[in-house]
Image (cartoon, rainbow, N blue to C red):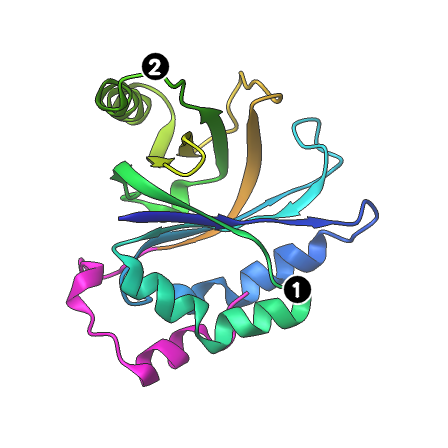
Amino acid sequence: MIAMQYSFTLPADYDMDIIRRRIAERGHFTDDFPLLGFKAYLYADRGDSRSRDNLYAPFYLWEDNEGMNAFLGGPGFAALVASFGRPAISVWSVWHAQRPNDAGAARYATREIVAIPPEASLEAWREAETVWLKQDIAMRDAVGGVVAFEPSTWTLVSFRLWAHQPRTLDTERAQCYAVGHVSVPTNGRDARDTVLTRSASADHVTASV
């Protein structure tokens, strides 16, 4: 699996209701997108004490690179680029992921990126991060999440979807977002059950944000 995120930093006086409306009107177009584990439509308001900037920053979990390539090469992403410019995209190799059982329960998200020390055991980090993710879901307020790493910079991403805003957050290390919508496979289908076709890809993403 592959985790992916891009982020747009918007002007300080940007009307974030524009982003909220776009998500409300168009977010469902990526529901059941082929090979998509989930897409969390994330944004942050500069006026919020937990964010320094106005942000639009969707986070994706892909079953494999085929789905990711179809999205990035499709008309929906082209429309996004036309509206906001082409973003730099962060991609991570997934250690463990938990797709939300109730996508509508996710109201907030957090993302933390940390450096993996040169002397660290990658397997030990993978095991520890997997345990922490499972504990957050079982014992705290998390409804889903991803832990993954990027080997060219040796960084770890720890991502959570939350039912309520986390009470404690190190804003120097972590970014908190509001969740506008979460696209997930519906009707019990796994993303791999959908055959990727050129027409199906276009139908799903033409009006995507």
Q: Which residue type does callout 1 highlight?
A: Gly
Could you say where residue 44 lies in the image, as x and y percent from the top left? 64, 41
Q: Residue at x 39, y 80 (%)?
A: 203
> Which of the two residues, 31 or 1, is positioned nearer the viewer here?
1
Look at the picture and state if 98 lies above or below 192.
above
Q: Quadrant of residue 144?
A: top left
Quarter the C terminus occupies:
bottom right
Could you say where residue 171 lies in the image, as x and y percent from the top left? 61, 22
Is residue 138 located in the magenta-colored stretch of the structure?
A: no
Could you say where residue 191 lies in the image, as x and y percent from the top left? 22, 61
Q: Residue at x 65, y 27 (%)?
A: 50
Is residue 200 located in the magenta-colored stretch of the structure?
A: yes
Q: Which residue type does callout 2 highlight?
A: Glu
Which mark is first along the chain, 2 or 1? 1
Look at the picture and state if 137 lies above or below 76.
above
Q: Residue at x 61, y 68 (%)?
A: 81
Could you say where residue 58 lies in the image, as x and y percent from the top left? 51, 51
Q: Which residue was labeled with disc 2? A: 119
Q: Residue at x 38, y 19 (%)?
A: 118
| Separation (CA) of disc 1 from disc 2 | 39 Å
Question: Which region is colored magenta?
Answer: 184-209
In-image side of 42 versus 118 (left or right): right
Q: Residues within 10 Å of mark 1 (few under 14, many from 20)?
A: few
> Which of the two residues, 119 or 9, is positioned nearer the viewer here?
119
SS under mark 1: loop
- Which label sits on residue 115? none
Q: Which residue was labeled with disc 1? A: 85
